[in-house]
Amino acid sequence: MPTRLGLVSDVHATTAPLAAALALFHDEGVDQVICAGDIAGYGDELEATVDLLESSGCRAICGNHDRWHLARTHGQSGPVDTYLDGLSKTLDLSVEGRRVHVVHASPPGSLMEGIRLLDENGDMLVQERQHWNERLAAFDFDLLIVGHTHQLFAERLADTLVVNPGSTLFNRSCAIVDLPSLEIRLLPLPGERALRVSSWRGGWK
């Protein structure tokens, strides 16, 4: 049976856009939700955000803001810090015969070196696309899921489909991918207009 993945990233402790994405996934019959990190940061609803992710059965990884949060709180023993501290830097899956790698910024496990393919207008940066084509030439996965840059794209780089679902908070977006077909849909949150690029400062938010 085909499997449908719902992808979110950079939810940044803000519940309303995350809840909208999860509701969309429910309506679309998503089998598994994946979050590509940065659960913490910017917003002030971290506990409720973690509750939403956990109740959805989301498989999440950590991002730079999650590590920074733990550094500030010194890994306190509350449930939020326990949850964030338990997140790995990467997630490797085999789904319907497809190999999937999830990392916040870029493989193999970077939290900061983001895959920035678009300029401030949402147009393709040809040199960056070529750079990542070369960087991923030996990458042995069918699907790479990233976040970090607050850019919304799905591009085939070398032999890998690379998907950034954008930030639910800043891009107002999410994504759905069907496996094994690798059919991808980049979606605005209900009632919103998705931004291909948001919080543009060289892409390193």
Image: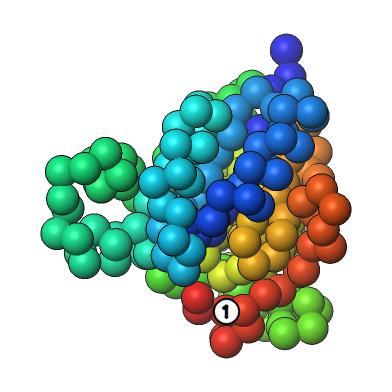
Q: Residue furthest top?
A: 1
Tell me what residue is drawn at x 49 percent, y 37 percent.
Answer: 53
Q: Secondary structure at mark 1?
A: loop
Q: Is residue 52 left or right of residue 172?
A: left
Residue 138 in view (yes/no): no
Q: Is residue 114 left or right of residue 180?
A: left
Residue type at mark 1 is Gly
Q: Quadrant of residue 117?
A: bottom right
Q: Nearer the viewer, residue 63 or 134?
A: 63
Tell me what residue is drawn at x 44 percent, y 37 percent.
Answer: 51
The x and y percentages for residue 118 are 71, 76
Q: Nearer the viewer, residue 200 or 158?
A: 200
**Residue underneath mark 1:** 203
The x and y percentages for residue 23 are 71, 35
Tell me what residue is drawn at x 65 percent, y 23 percent.
Answer: 31
Tell me what residue is drawn at x 80 percent, y 79 percent.
Answer: 123
Q: Quadrant of the N terminus?
A: top right
* Looking at the image, residue 153 lies above or below residue 61: below
Q: Nearer the viewer, residue 79 or 175?
A: 79
Badge 1 crowding class, 10 Å Cα cut-off, few under 14, some 14 to 19, many 20 or more, is: many
The x and y percentages for residue 146 are 55, 55
